[in-house]
Amino acid sequence: MGPRCTQCNGFRLVTKVNKIIGFSSERNSLGMRMRACLIAAVASVALALSACTDHRPSTASSVTAPTLTGDPAHPGITSGWVDTKLYFDIGLVENAETRWHDFLDREVTPRFPDGLSVIDVHGQWQGKNQAAPEHHPTRLLIIDYPDTKENRDKIEAIRSAWKKLTGEQSVLRVTQPADVSF
């Protein structure tokens, strides 16, 4: 390390800041030197913190090694997969939960038997002819799968089946590329 500043016990950066902002110890007050020390300290902390971050996106090779191998339905490392989220308004009908679970068993699981997730969420929807949004229990279905026409068609079949069963206007779908590892 370099020589320390006698005023604040800081390092060589204080001297450089003093030179940059144009004052020397002979002609400036203690307050000015303390301000320079404070600027140097803040700059040092900012520099140290910026060195601690890594802005590179993770790649499959930098991720923890997969624990599953040899399973085509759950490959260790994938490419060309997508993450699809479907939002289902299960409604306020008396047997909403039973209807939802029957739908999962009959329409969803046979199309994607290798795995899926369901999350209970609070949803709201305002139709184009409604004055205010309606609040309904909603299920978020998450499925990760290889992005093929066959799988996209399965997703659309699930959406259509729910709208036909319930009379709902919409099942929101959000699909994004996914870096998947099992």
Image: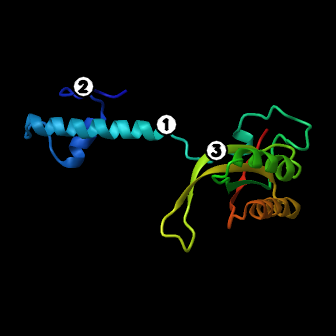
**Residue pictured at 7% horizontal, 40% vertical:** 27
Q: Which amino acid lies under the numbered mark 2 shown in the image of this protein? A: Asn
Question: Quick check: 132 left or right of 8?
Answer: right
Residue depicted at 88% across the width and 44% down the height? 73
The kind of secondary structure element at disc 3 is strand
Q: Residue at x 74, y 41 (%)?
A: 61
Query: Mark 1 — residue?
Result: 52
Structural crowding at the residue carrying mark 2, measured as other residues with C-alpha within 10 Å and reported as few (<14), some (14–19) or many (≥20):
few
The reply to whether callout 1 and callout 2 are in contact (CB within 8 Å) is no
Task: Say which residue label 2 marks.
Answer: 9
- Which of disc 2 and disc 3 is earlier in sequence? 2
Q: Are marks 3 and 2 in contact (CB under 8 Å)?
A: no
Q: Give the percent coordinates (x, y) of residue 55.
A: 55, 46
Q: Describe residue 30's horizontal placement relative to residue 113 as left or right.
A: left
Q: State the CA–CA distance, disc 3 to disc 1.
A: 37 Å
| Residue at horizontal 51 percent and vertical 62 percent from the top | 133
Front one among 83 and 103: 103
Q: Which of 61 and 128 is in front in this view?
A: 128
Q: Earlier in the sequence, mark 1 or mark 2?
A: 2
The amino acid sitting under disc 1 is Cys
SS label for mark 2? loop
Please identify the quadrant where the C terminus is shown: top right
Sequence-first tag of 3 and 1: 1
Nearer the observer, disc 3 or disc 2?
3
Q: Name the residue under label 3.
A: 120
Query: Where is residue 159, by image quadrant?
Result: bottom right
Amino acid on which disc 3 is placed? Asp
Give the mark count.
3
Q: Which colour scheme is used?
A: rainbow
